[in-house]
Image (cartoon, rainbow, N blue to C red):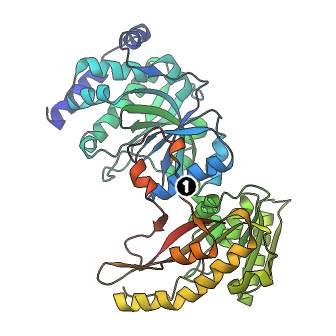
Amino acid sequence: MSAADLENAMLKYQHRSISNRQIQNELGTHQNVKVLATKETVYVFAPGKNWKLSLAELVTFLKAREFKFKVADLSKSFFIIATENAFDPSLVDYLGGIIKTGRVLSQIPLKTVEEAFFDGNEQALAETKAHLLSDYVLDELFATCATKCLFGVSLYSDSSRLLRFSKGMQRFVGSCFKDELASRGTRAKFMGFPKRRELPQLTHVEVLKKGLIEKGAEILFCLGREDVFISKTVAVHNPFEFQKRDVGRPVQRKIFSIPPRLAKIMVNLSMCLPGKVLLDPFCGVGTILQEALVNKARVIGMDKNHWCVEASRTNLHWLENEYDLKEAEYTIQLGDARDLTEKICKGTVDCIVTEPDLGPPLRHFPTESYAKEIIQKLKPLYCDFLEGAYKALAAKGNLVFTTPYIRARSGSFVTLELNEKAKAAGFTAVNPFGIENFTDNARMGELMRTSSFVDMEKRHKIGREINILQK
């Protein structure tokens, strides 16, 4: 069946009148349909561009707070987390790598959806529609809607096979809800998006600006390995807050400053809990310190540059007032990260999160030989820093830091290899992915081989390799 034929079949079918009794009969006759009870705590998380880094942050964040959870399904575009503890929607505010969070309301076997949308199987279409329009799903999705409602549907899938039908699926799901709401006397508007958009997904900014969480709904239609998860968005990443803590703060240093989003991720990778002491010995203008302070850590900043020390103080004072952080604890001092214990007492720091020197700004992609020259000049600084960091950290303390990841003119990458030095200093490399937290083992081999995370876009000449060590 062609995509056009399938589209016509779906449009014809979705406008068939189905009563609520018929819907319940459909649910009763299709044994594969699973409707999740309200007491279940199953969530979907949509990551940013770097899905491995986002997953590492999320898993580490939950482990640090002793959540009992399992990663029940896993793809590059979404994670399904089953937990014994209900998540507060505000959790997304404490994460840097998660774009959307949704509560899973129901799920249906992927095979049924494939038969419905690939083959135009009428029985499978009936099962899919009946499942979407169950009382529980409708009541949970549109609890805040009375006489009128604005809602959207976003489809998530890694399957290239499914991409051909993704927009048709998204329209089918949206039309099902719109027609059902109209039959109940609710004027519903189904939110669209530009045709040029590759995937039928609303951005987190669109969800925020249209107020879909507070006074409407966004439905997440997530196609996993074996099941399709139907979820309601409960929280989205707010880029405007990160923007405020970046360009809205009093002092900025654009070329050398780490993005607040990445700083937040690194703080979480260090397992830094509220009340813990976090040190950034290359603090610059205080970006990492800001994100740790927002997460209610006690922070210590250090830099050998007088201007950076004053800039950090100014920015943290601004942050304290802007976010009303009445119990904020922070200290900024002048010092050299090559010898931390001159300023920091041994064994007194719970975690160190920092970005040392990544090398000079480059106007063009360097030759491989020049990239290696940059690395060799930086290596002594990193080696001295590792030794001091080990002494400053408390037992089992974590060190999260970046190293340069240089793209050479040839297309190859030149990196700073510190494994042997870190091991000699006493550190152990940390892999945040533990098999005990995963029920979907399809990607575990790939994840278990992950010893560091690269954050770099194609246009970048120098990226960041994020390393996680433990004392």
Asked if 77 appears above or below 308 in the picture, the reply is above
Question: Which residue occupies 81% across, 59% down?
Answer: 324
- Examine the rendered structure and indicate whether residue 99 appears above or below residue 354: above
| Image coordinates for residue 197, horizontal then vertical, percent | 34, 52
Return the x and y of residue 422 as percentages of the image width and height: 58, 74
Name the image quarter holding the C terminus: bottom right
Where residue 82 sits, quadrant-wise, is: top right
Q: Is residue 76 visible?
A: no
Question: For numbered disc 1, what is the local secondary structure?
Answer: loop
The N terminus - image quarter: top left
- Amino acid carrying label 1: it is Pro
> Along the line of sight, which residue is nearer the eye, 14 or 29?
29
**349 versus 179 height, above or below:** below
- The answer to whether residue 407 is visible is yes
Residue extending farthest to the right is 326
Residue bearing mark 1: 432
